[in-house]
Image: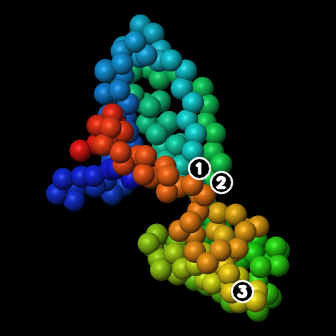
């Protein structure tokens, strides 16, 4: 997604559009690589497995559902694997229970974050999905973890066993991958203008 772009700020703003774009992408892939996918009623595609983490918990099921309804190709979907999947925002925005159980925050901080979680859940109940109350929950919990140690380091949001000044350095080695992905030869091979 880091190389995604759009003309005239014409981005998808709902799941129907996103699902349609994904199906169009896979159809074009099948057209360019017909040895992998034949037209419906002749043969199925090669076995497909979808996997992902985080927000893939929302998008992988959406994509698979869209492909099951495809009228041009018959996709042989064999499985889905999701890790640390974003499935239920109502309960996943708040990490205070986890932080408290690990001893990263104290009881007072925990109670303060529980009040903020209730504000977030109320916003979600009213279909306000871009609520600042929700977006702030993780950051507020991380800030609270810095108050509980002498070096004022935050818990690492990607690995709660680790403490960091900033998550900009995570995962280790990401700078080398980013440098490699931006090489002109790699960008050309991926058809990135």
**Image x and y of residue 149, in percent:** 76, 86
CA distance separating discs 2 and 1: 6 Å
**Image x and y of residue 86, in percent:** 59, 57
| Residue 168 seen anywhere in this rendered image of the structure | yes
Determine the secondary structure under disc 3.
Answer: loop
- Quick one: label 2 or label 3, which is nearer the N terminus? 2
CA distance separating discs 3 and 1: 31 Å
Label 1 packing within 10 angstroms: few (<14), some (14-19), many (20+): some
Q: Nearer the viewer, mark 3 or mark 1?
A: 3
| Residue 141 seen anywhere in this rendered image of the structure | no
- Quick one: label 3 or label 1, which is nearer the N terminus? 1
Q: Nearer the viewer, residue 2 or 79?
A: 2
Q: At 31% from the left edge and 20% from the top edge, which residue is drawn?
A: 31
Label 2 packing within 10 angstroms: few (<14), some (14-19), many (20+): few
Q: How is the image coloured?
A: rainbow
Determine the secondary structure under disc 2.
Answer: strand
- Quick one: label 2 or label 1, which is nearer the N terminus? 1
Most extreme residue toward the bottom, as rendered? 108
Label 3 packing within 10 angstroms: few (<14), some (14-19), many (20+): few
Residue designated by label 1: 53
**Image x and y of residue 182, in percent:** 36, 48
Q: At 44% from the left edge and 52% from the top edge, which residue is drawn?
A: 178
Most extreme residue toward the left, as rendered? 8
Residue designated by label 3: 151
CA distance separating discs 2 and 3: 29 Å
Mark 2–mark 1 CB contact (< 8 Å): yes
Vertical comparison of 99 with 64: above or below: below
Determine the secondary structure under disc 1.
Answer: strand
Residue designated by label 2: 84
Q: Nearer the viewer, residue 128 or 18?
A: 18
């Amino acid at each position: 997604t880091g190389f995604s772009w759009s003309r005239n700020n014409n981005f998808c703003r709902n799941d129907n559009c996103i699902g349609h774009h994904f199906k169009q992408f896979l159809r074009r892939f099948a057209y360019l690589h017909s040895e992998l996918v034949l037209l419906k009623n002749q043969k199925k595609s090669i076995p497909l497995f979808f996997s992902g983490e985080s927000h893939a918990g929302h998008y992988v099921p959406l994509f698979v559902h869209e492909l099951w309804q495809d009228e041009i190709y018959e996709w042989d979907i064999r499985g889905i694997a999701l890790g640390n999947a974003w499935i239920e925002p109502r309960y996943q925005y708040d990490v205070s229970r986890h932080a408290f159980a690990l001893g990263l925050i104290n009881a007072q901080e925990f109670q303060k974050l529980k009040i903020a979680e209730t504000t977030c859940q109320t916003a979600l109940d009213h279909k306000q999905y871009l609520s600042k109350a929700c977006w702030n929950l993780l950051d507020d919990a991380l800030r609270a973890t810095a108050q509980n140690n002498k070096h004022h380091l935050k818990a690492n949001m990607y690995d709660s066993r680790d403490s960091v000044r900033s998550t900009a350095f995570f995962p280790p080695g990401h700078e080398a991958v980013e440098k490699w992905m931006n090489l002109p030869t790699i960008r050309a091979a991926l058809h990135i203008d």
